[in-house]
Amino acid sequence: AKAGIVCKLNCRATIIAVMNPRDCLYDNHASLSRNTGLGTPLLSRFDIIFKMVDSSDASRDSNITTYLLNRAIAGEGFQCSDNNASEQVEQPWSMDKLRAYISIVKDRFNPTISSDAALLMERHYEKCRSAESTTIPITVRFLESMIRLSQAHARLLYRSIVTLQDAVAILRIMECSAFAYGGFDSNVDDVHNVMYCDPMTIDFSNNADLDFLAFQLKILERYGLVNRMQPDDQKKALEYINEGSISQRWEDDQCSEMTHHTSAWQTLQTGTVQEDHYGRFHFPTQSPFQKRHQQGT
């Protein structure tokens, strides 16, 4: 409404925004709205919001430097070193082929949501809505975001129906964003249901399909929908978990995270200031894993 004129203008566009926090340093003790300087009504209009803090990590820093230096060497005509030279890596699609595929599926499919996918998204919405601690208040826009993203995922896989697997894939993405159950701080009573994963620490497994089945089994167990999963998929997921591939990797990640934050945790208790690898001084924060570990004890 403006100057007595009430009208509605349709704007169908995708917005991808990137920003730095205030003072160029993210404060984990402050809200997302305070760190970004954006109000929660505006933040709730984004389907996905990731927090990507450039903390010092030896393994990740080594991978980044190797990748960038190899690209620089390749630009000069030298042969690049390859840590996975023995593995055969599939070449990704070219940009022209990717654009053509997206154009085709965007025009051809307008997916409808299956009953299983609708039930899972409904229960996930109710679960996140009931959480007392969230990074962003959960409104009906959150449900609309899940619907849009699940339809986009179905189009990506050349489907006209949003299946249960599409909904699970979207929930896995959501659990890495500000809309995860419990938010970034995961400060909820039922910590065993917290599934937030920092996108900066995700380790992509060579068994991506089995990893997905294991996550699907876990998320369906959370909402009492295991009977909606195919028996063969349940069997594969249980075998994969029992083999220790998932549990051991999660344990290794947690131990690595605890080791990485040990000095910061001790520094926080003594009240001193920590210096990061950029030479910036700030108060260290407590990791979500340490919070859950402390609450469990």
Image (spheres, helix red, strand yellow):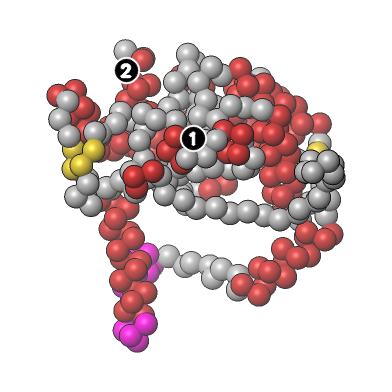
For badge 1, the amino acid type reads Ser
Label 1, secondary structure: give it.
helix
Q: What's drawn in magenta, residue-wise?
A: 75-86
Q: Main secondary structure of the magenta part?
A: loop
147 left or right of 296? right
Residue named by callout 1 = 33
Asked whether disc 2 touches disc 1, contact meaning CB atoms under 8 Å apart, the reply is no
Q: Is residue 87 left or right of residue 269?
A: right
The dot on residue 157 is: none
Q: Is residue 173 magenta?
A: no
* 90 vs 109, nearest the viewer: 109
* Residue under pointer 2: 294
Q: Is residue 81 magenta?
A: yes
Q: Position of residue 29 (x, y in %)?
A: 36, 28
Q: Amino acid at mark 2?
A: Gln
- The quadrant the C terminus occupies is top left
Q: Quadrant of the N terminus?
A: top right
